Amino acid sequence: MAIIRRLLHNEDMHDIVAVPGGRNAFLVTAGTTEQSWVDLNDPLLLEFEYVQRVAEVLEAVILNRPIQQRIRIVHVGGGGLTLPRYVAARRPHSAQLVLEPDIDLIEQVRKRLPLPANSGIKVRAVDGLAGIAQMPDDYADCVIVDAFEHGCVPPDFATASFFTDVRRILHPDGIMIMNLTDKSPFGWTRRTFAGIAKTWPNLAASAETPVWKGRRFGNFVIVAAADKLPLDELERAISKAAFPHRLSWGEALKRWIGAAEPFSAQDAVSSPKFVPWQ
């Protein structure tokens, strides 16, 4: 029992580990899970594949807007603040708000991985559901949902009501980007996508090809918008990925979602957890 208690406790513990090789780069871990990868010398260098996919969407839809337009991005989930650092480097003076309830993690990141002066990044110690609910209508250009608890996406971030609230705080031309993880037969992801499809008319989702085929556990990155998405540009970007990826949208994505019903606040559950020995 003592061993079990220690293992459970370790799942709640964060650590920041220097990456070998003399670089000023660090891994933020939660238990045995690698949560974030941060290069303090080069915030544009993104190590994790799914983070690269999110950045490609940002480049295609948000970061290419006229430079005189100050963009506002809300991040649900903080980690090592990899994406906020990326945006701050690409578009200085952007207004970014990070919703991260783990105060211990926030303090560790501030101490070990300090943000540059005048980064425009503000971190609020509040969970994403409450933080979004407190925001006014028409507040943000983009909401990025990348939040995990014990290695799973919490049920609060899978419901149709959550997505409705996210759309409420977005500008009419704003977008939501969400990172989630699942394994075949993807029942949780299909229901989550169904809730997103109920809220926005235009969706596109990317994942590594073996993940789409159900061969292994992995990340899905979905982008949702009221306006049409730059699908050609997103396809060109994903074609350059180090590992084969596929972008799905339109009728193909609808068929993949199938008859799945959106989660409600009453029946929502966490996403499946990665178990390496299964």
Image: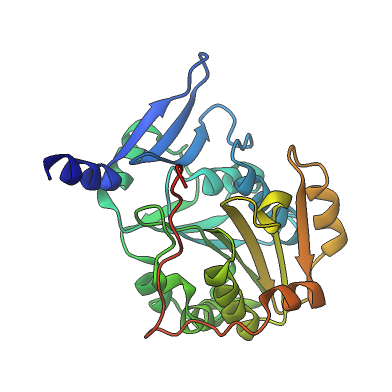
Residue that extends furthest to the front in the rendered view of this protein? 278
Q: Is residue 37 visible?
A: yes
**In the image: residue 154, left or right of residue 258:** left
Percent position (x, y) of residue 167? 57, 79
**In the image: residue 81, left or right of residue 67:** left
Percent position (x, y) of residue 72? 57, 63
Residue located 45% across and 71% down the image: 157
**In the image: residue 164, left or right of residue 89:** left
Residue located 45% across and 61% down the image: 272
Instruction: State whether residue 24 is above or below residue 223.
Output: above
Q: Quadrant of residue 168?
A: bottom right
Q: Nearer the viewer, residue 101 or 88?
A: 101
Percent position (x, y) of residue 121? 47, 51
Q: Is residue 173 visible?
A: no
Percent position (x, y) of residue 146? 50, 57
Q: Nearer the viewer, residue 278 or 103?
A: 278
Q: Quadrant of residue 187?
A: bottom right
Residue located 12% across and 45% down the image: 1
Q: Nearer the viewer, residue 176 or 246?
A: 246
Residue located 42% across and 54% down the image: 122
Residue that extends furthest to the top in the rendered view of this protein? 22
Instruction: State whether residue 47 is above or below residue 238.
Output: above
**In the image: residue 22, left or right of residue 155:** right
